[in-house]
Amino acid sequence: MATIPVEEQPPLAIGTPPNVFDGYAPEPEGPVTISEGPPTFADQHQLLLIDGAVLLLVIVILAIAVWRGRR
């Protein structure tokens, strides 16, 4: 199979960014933090807040459904 020189290669499809197939990965914007080890107290506290908010939302929805069902 003959290799095509870079100058003679056909262009990529219209709208395809040129870095899709060349293995280039753009740098992420902003600071990137990689957490190592077990979750910290702040991580666990945030998860508890999210769990509590979801549980409260479910209770409110069920209470509204029961209240509307009795009317």
Image (cartoon, rainbow, N blue to C red):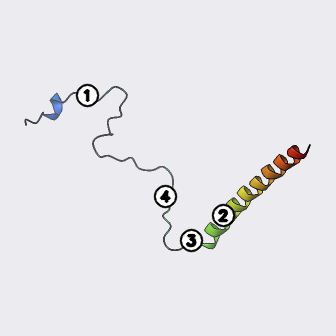
Name the residue that disc number 2 marks. 46
Name the residue that disc number 3 marks. 39
Tell me which label, 3 or 2, sits earlier in the chain: 3
Name the residue that disc number 1 marks. 11
Name the residue at 69% across, 61% down.
51
Name the image quarter holding residue 22: top left
Tell me which label, 3 or 4, sits earlier in the chain: 4
Name the residue that disc number 4 marks. 32
Pick the residue in front: 55 or 70. Answer: 70
Local secondary structure at mark 2: helix
Tell me which label, 2 or 4, sits earlier in the chain: 4
Front tag of 3 and 4: 3
Front tag of 4 and 1: 1
* Quarter of the image that includes the C terminus: top right
Determine whether label 3 and label 2 are within 8 Å by CB: no
* Quarter of the image that includes the N terminus: top left
Pick the residue in front: 64 or 20. Answer: 64
Name the residue at 17% across, 34% down.
6
Q: CA distance from mark 2 to mark 4?
A: 19 Å
Categorize mark 2 by other alpha carbons within 10 Å: few (<14), some (14-19), many (20+): few
> What is the three-letter code of the residue carrying label 2?
Gln
Q: CA distance from mark 3 to mark 4?
A: 17 Å
Name the residue at 68% across, 65% down.
48
Could you tell whether 55 is left or right of 34 in the image? right
Local secondary structure at mark 3: loop
